Image: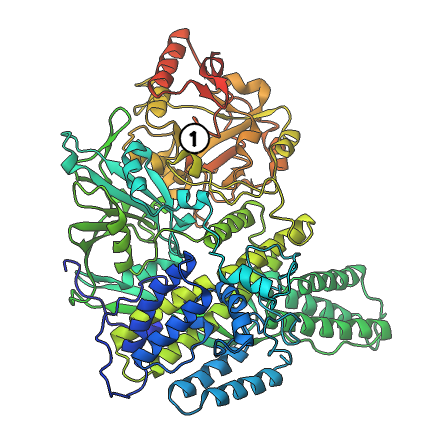
């Protein structure tokens, strides 16, 4: 294979999230009869290959939960794996395990089906409980034949009682467990698709025959149509890529490695018109935390130094404490109390100290109401107890006892530099070279490319990677030499003539990246919620950080347990360890999606003052990415905290505007009307610098090179202005048309759209994501001012949902030229208005 062999690396080099890489590719021989050397990776590899196909049949309604379980036990027996199996051997996601349990319950109760190993505890014991560590230990003994099934069940029952889950034998978990709460703060028996305020089994007793009939034969709910449109799996999608022109067709992918979970497929035409030489390219951006996995897959000429993440246990303060400064505030008030108390002192505590004590208690009690993990809860209680001793000292006019910072053992990621030797033959053949771009050109609504690249020192460095079978990848790393907006971008280039990109998607696996369609509905919804966290300004909120910390601690804990178990299995080669560990860690990440979705929904419901389950009922709650309707360019999501009417009320008397620049070094060689015509005929998107370069459009903005350094090149620039100034600009929108998007931010002055926190322009004049701030930003701005800039990620679709209110040109001749371009593109209306009403002479 052209890409070289897979590397043999330590499982510990995976780091958090590294499992989003490679599905099990084991195809070993079946165990020979009569051999009893224990359960090997070969057996498990064969089992999981079978399970993947069987579970798809269950999801399609072809087999029932009982049939799935019966067949799974039969397959395990043939492979030499002890039975009965646990429910975790049927499904990975906790929500799916709970669903299977409900369907199997009537048959387990009647004895028709032998109880699965962990049946009593699914949906009852929280997934972050230490109980599951004991479960793994007992299961290892069961696998080795050291204990029987009955002994296994008895040991688990005793452990459940010991940890406080006294009702763990309840078949359906009707009662709340008396032990620790789950990570999400929601009962584990709530299905993600079921409103939290609607109790499970509300209409029928879950153990009743009616309930069994309703669950056992009903096929799973099909994915929503919009998800299959945004995250396609069929051939029709790839035939539409060429029709999408220079903008390409976006698709959502699974896993945590790709920014916005979105890749864009673009078909570049051959300059000579030969369809056999057309080139399909997948564009995407790798998250910075996933870069180490990609570099780990390479065999570089000349070698390189890479940073490898590993997990270690450290006793240290919690991240939320270091971020919010709870201990520092406690220490400050304690010192102040002791400074003003004692012999020779007036024993009068300053108002600012008393106020600080009240503020600290309020913060801690607020966090206490939303904390998800046990360590955060313990920290809060510790600080509240210490604060109480300070309050008592104030009342008694005595010195307060010494306060100490709360610390706890935590699994944390650390980075180590590892030298990868010169071309060792392990991994994908790759070369580090001077940075470059695809040298495409736009040609009347098409992008043409002959396979050549534009090399320039300005682009820093890049990795050229041989993926095998004629496929190539070019990756632009997170290196200081690479312009900020270009960092992390990747191009996967198919051989000439290939029209279907599914093999290109598979090639991403060889880069240790998980980027396959379809994304699950939960993954798409988590992306939507995370987008709104950023848009609504909650990315630094202590409650949100506590949710993330709890989930991260749980993920690290489970990953460490998985890795240690794999290394302990006899007969498991290092290659098998690596493959299986990556898949298990990926499954671990995805298993937390249901918990993360529920936690974020409850977070927003609290912030917005909604009842449990109220978020999904908002008319503005739409997890559908916006480009799913337009099928081109890029995805965007709306803000559910803003309606068009709310934006309209906050921005009365204002508009959003854009000023076009002519083509040429003086920006005047081609007229603005010519530029506008080219935009319309190339897909109708007011594109960011990065998107224009990808499309092959040579037109530059006012400061394209500088914007690449600051990161602003990933955004389309607009201005917030008084409506009375609108004719001084070329494109004008009502604010409510654009500001319900979740990907914009604004700066008070011209900060070059900086998103690079190390750039000197970043945050220089102030920035906001609040609509109500914009009128103040623009109050002194005149037509020539660069104040009050509003940036929109990727661009703005002028022909679709974000069509402008007006387009102003200088002459009637320019107006007719623009209208002709609309006619050529087949566009007669913009948001229901004739284009003739939109295009106007100043």
**Residue 700 picture location, percent across and down:** 33, 30
Q: Does 128 sit above or below residue 526?
A: below
Residue at left offset 65%, top offset 76%: 404
Residue at x-position 23% and y-position 34%: 440
Which image quadrant is residue 181 in? bottom right
Q: Give residue 513's quadrant in the image.
A: bottom left
Q: Is residue 505 left or right of residue 762?
A: left
Tell me: 679 left or right of 169: left
Coloration mode: rainbow
Q: Residues within 10 Å of mark 1 (few under 14, many from 20)?
A: many
Q: In the rendered image, is residue 786 in sight?
A: yes
Rendered view: 93 above or below 507: below
Q: Relative to residue 251, is residue 195 depicted above or below?
A: below
Q: What percent of the width, then of the height, locates residue 400?
A: 76, 76
Identify which residue, 664 or 320, lies in the foreground: 320
**Image quarter hosting the N terminus:** bottom left
* Left or right, 538 with reference to 566: right
Can residue 667 be seen at all in this image of the molecule? no
- Identify whether 337 is placed above or below 475: below
| Residue drawn at (51%, 48%) of the image | 528
The residue that appears at 43% across and 30% down in the rendered structure is: 797
Would you name the residue on which mark 1 appears?
797
Q: Position of residue 570 (x, y in %)?
A: 30, 85
Nearer to me, 287 or 120: 120
Total residue callouts: 1
Q: Residue furthest bottom?
A: 146
What kind of element bears circle 1?
A: strand
Q: Position of residue 724 (x, y in %)?
A: 59, 18
């Amino acid at each position: 294979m052209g890409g070289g062999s897979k590397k043999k690396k330590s499982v510990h080099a995976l780091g958090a999230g590294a499992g989003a890489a490679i599905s099990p590719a084991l195809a070993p021989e079946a165990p020979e009869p009569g051999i009893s050397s224990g359960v090997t990776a070969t057996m498990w590899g064969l089992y999981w290959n079978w399970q993947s196909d069987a579970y798809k049949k269950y999801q399609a309604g072809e087999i029932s939960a009982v049939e799935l379980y019966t067949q799974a036990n039969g397959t395990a027996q043939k492979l030499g794996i002890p039975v009965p199996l646990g429910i975790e051997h049927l499904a990975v996601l906790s929500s799916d395990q709970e669903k299977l349990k409900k369907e199997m319950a009537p048959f387990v109760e009647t004895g028709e089906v032998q109880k699965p190993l962990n049946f009593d505890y699914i949906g009852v014991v929280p997934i972050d409980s230490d109980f599951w560590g004991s479960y793994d230990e007992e299961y290892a003994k069961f696998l080795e034949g050291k204990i029987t099934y009955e002994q296994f069940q008895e040991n688990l029952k005793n452990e459940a009682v010991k940890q406080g889950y006294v009702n763990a034998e309840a078949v359906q978990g009707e009662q709340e467990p008396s032990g620790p709460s789950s990570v999400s703060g929601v009962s584990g028996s709530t299905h993600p698709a079921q409103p939290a305020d609607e109790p499970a089994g509300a209409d029928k007793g879950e153990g009743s025959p009616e309930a069994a009939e309703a669950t056992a034969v009903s096929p799973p709910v099909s994915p929503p149509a919009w998800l299959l449109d945004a995250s396609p799996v069929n051939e029709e999608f790839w035939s539409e890529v060429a029709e999408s022109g220079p903008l390409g067709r976006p698709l959502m992918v699974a896993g945590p490695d790709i920014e916005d979970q979105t890749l864009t497929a673009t078909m570049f035409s051959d300059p000579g018109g030969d369809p056999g030489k057309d080139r399909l390219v997948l564009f995407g951006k790798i998250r910075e935390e996933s870069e180490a996995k990609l570099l780990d897959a390479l065999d570089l000429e000349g070698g390189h130094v890479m940073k490898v993440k590993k997990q270690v246990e450290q006793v240290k303060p919690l991240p939320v404490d270091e971020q919010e400064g709870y201990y520092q505030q406690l220490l400050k008030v304690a010192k102040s109390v002791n400074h003003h108390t004692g012999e020779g002192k007036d024993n009068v505590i300053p108002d600012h100290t008393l106020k600080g004590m009240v503020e600290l208690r309020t913060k801690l009690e607020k966090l206490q109401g939303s904390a998800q993990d046990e360590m955060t809860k313990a920290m809060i209680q510790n600080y509240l107890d210490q604060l109480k001793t300070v309050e008592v000292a104030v009342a008694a006019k005595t010195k307060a006892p010494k306060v100490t910072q709360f610390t706890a053992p935590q699994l944390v990621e650390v980075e180590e530099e590892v030298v990868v030797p010169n071309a060792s033959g392990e991994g994908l053949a790759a070369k580090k070279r001077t940075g470059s771009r695809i040298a495409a050109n736009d040609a009347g609504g098409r992008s043409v490319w002959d396979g050549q690249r534009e090399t320039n020192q300005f682009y820093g460095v890049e990795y050229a990677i041989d993926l095998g079978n004629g496929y190539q990848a070019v990756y632009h790393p997170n290196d200081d030499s690479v312009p900020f907006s270009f960092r992390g971008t990747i191009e996967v280039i198919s051989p000439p003539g290939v029209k279907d990109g599914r093999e290109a998607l598979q090639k991403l696996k060889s880069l240790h990246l998980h980027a396959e369609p379809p994304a699950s509905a939960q993954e798409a919804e988590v992306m939507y919620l995370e987008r709104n966290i950023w848009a609504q300004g909650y990315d630094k909120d202590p409650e949100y950080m506590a949710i993330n910390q709890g989930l991260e601690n749980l993920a690290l804990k489970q990953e460490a347990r998985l890795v240690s178990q794999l290394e302990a299995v006899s007969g498991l080669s290092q290659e098998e360890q690596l493959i299986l560990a990556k898949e298990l860690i990926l499954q671990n990440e995805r298993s937390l999606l249901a918990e993360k979705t529920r936690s974020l929904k409850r977070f927003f419901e609290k912030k917005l003052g909604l009842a449990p389950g109220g978020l999904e009922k908002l008319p503005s709650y739409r997890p559908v990415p916006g480009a799913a309707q337009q099928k081109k360019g890029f995805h965007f999501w709306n803000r559910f905290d803003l309606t068009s009417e709310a934006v309209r009320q906050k921005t009365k008397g204002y508009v959003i505007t854009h000023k076009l620049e002519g083509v040429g070094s003086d920006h005047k060689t081609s007229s603005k009307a010519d530029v506008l015509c080219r935009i319309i005929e190339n897909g109708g998107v007011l594109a960011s610098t990065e998107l224009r370069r990808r499309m092959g459009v040579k037109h530059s903005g006012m400061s394209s090179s500088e914007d690449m350094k600051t990161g602003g090149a990933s955004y389309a620039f607009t201005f917030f202005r008084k409506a009375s100034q609108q004719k001084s600009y070329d494109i004008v929108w009502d604010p409510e048309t654009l500001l319900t998007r979740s990907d914009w931010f604004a700066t008070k002055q011209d900060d070059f759209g900086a998103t690079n926190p190390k750039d000197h322009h970043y945050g220089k004049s102030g920035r906001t994501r609040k609509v109500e701030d914009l009128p103040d930003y623009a109050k002194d701005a005149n037509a020539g001012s660069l104040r009050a800039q509003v940036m929109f990620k990727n661009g703005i679709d002028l022909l679709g949902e974000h069509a402008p209110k007006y387009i102003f040109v200088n002459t009637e001749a320019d107006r007719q030229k623009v209208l002709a371009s609309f006619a050529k593109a087949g566009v007669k209306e913009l948001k229901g208005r004739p284009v003739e009403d939109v295009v106007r002479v100043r």
